[in-house]
């Protein structure tokens, strides 16, 4: 069954909030001063998004502009559900809707929960220049969206856009970008370890230390130590 009441979704979010989860989120997210954290687990948010995927885009817009963190997250997940079931011009309209509101995607969990499932599917069938535009943004979260969106390409066996972004953003001032780059390199390594290792060997001294540490987490201990010691 699909529900379409924004009021009901908001009520459910508050009913499903857990104080312990809220306390944990307060430690790991560093929310903006005007944010409200409810404390709803991500699997619960995903379940709600599937149930409320029939919300109108106007209602999704209301959620994305809310200062309640989980409402923004729920809105992004509803958007992802709609992207998953569309293609062509309709999917492009949803992606444009997302890209016009990236200022609402303002923490790492919101980026990581949305970029590869909202923007990612479009990258598989659309123009990759949007990655360059996001990577050039002054906003940290836009740049992280660019990196995380390529997870969809990685899962499809297309690694070059991610490798190109690693080089583009290797001197980024933010540790959250360095970590994202390493994470995506690790995902490439899960599918083609020789390719990832060769990339690291070629560019090792250009990459941030944390990127190398994240990228090599799944390598054999001796192999990993070789890269980490070099950085």
Image (cartoon, helix red, strand yellow):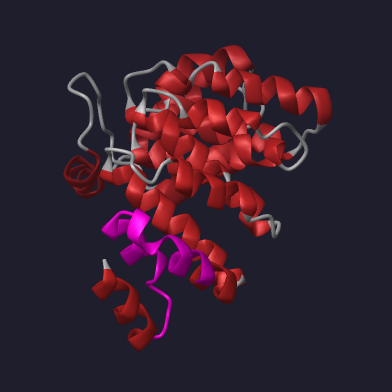
Q: Is residue 40 above or below residue 155?
A: above
Q: Classify residue 39 by image quadrant.
A: top left
Q: Kindly give the residue lying farthest to the right in the view shown.
A: 88
34 or 179, nearer to the observer: 179
First to last magenta residue range:
198-220
116 relative to 74 in the view: left or right: right
Report the quarter where the C terminus lies. Answer: bottom left
Residue 23 in view of the camera: yes
Is residue 181 shown left or right of residue 92?
left
Which sits in the foreground, 100 or 45? 100
- Residue beneath the point at 25% across and 40% down: 29
x and y, in percent, of residue 23 in the image: 17, 45
Image position, residue 177 (x, y; %): 36, 43
Residue 174, compared with residue 223, is above or below; it is above
Which quarter of the figure is the N terminus placed in?
A: top right
Task: Tell me if residue 218 comes above or below residue 207 in the rendering.
Answer: below
């Amino acid at each position: 069954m699909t529900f379409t009441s924004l009021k009901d979704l908001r009520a459910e979010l508050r009913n499903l909030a857990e104080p312990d989860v809220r306390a944990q989120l307060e430690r790991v997210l560093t929310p903006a001063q005007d944010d409200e954290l409810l404390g709803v687990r991500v699997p619960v948010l995903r379940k709600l998004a599937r149930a409320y995927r029939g919300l109108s885009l106007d209602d999704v817009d209301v959620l994305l502009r809310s200062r309640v963190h989980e409402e923004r997250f729920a809105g992004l997940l509803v958007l992802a559900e709609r992207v998953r079931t569309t293609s062509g011009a309709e999917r492009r309209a949803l992606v444009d809707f997302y890209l016009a509101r990236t200022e609402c995607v303002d923490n790492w969990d919101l980026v990581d929960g949305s970029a590869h499932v909202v923007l990612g599917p479009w990258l598989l069938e659309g123009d990759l220049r949007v990655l360059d535009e996001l990577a050039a943004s002054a906003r940290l979260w836009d740049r992280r969206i660019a990196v995380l969106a390529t997870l969809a390409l990685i899962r499809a066996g297309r690694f070059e856009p991610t490798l190109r972004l690693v080089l583009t953003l290797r001197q980024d001032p933010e540790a959250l970008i360095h970590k994202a780059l390493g994470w995506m390199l690790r995902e490439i390594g899960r599918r083609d370890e020789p390719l990832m290792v060769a990339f690291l060997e070629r560019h090792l001294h250009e990459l941030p230390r944390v990127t190398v540490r994240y990228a090599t987490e799944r390598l054999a201990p001796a192999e990993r130590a070789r890269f980490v010691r070099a950085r």
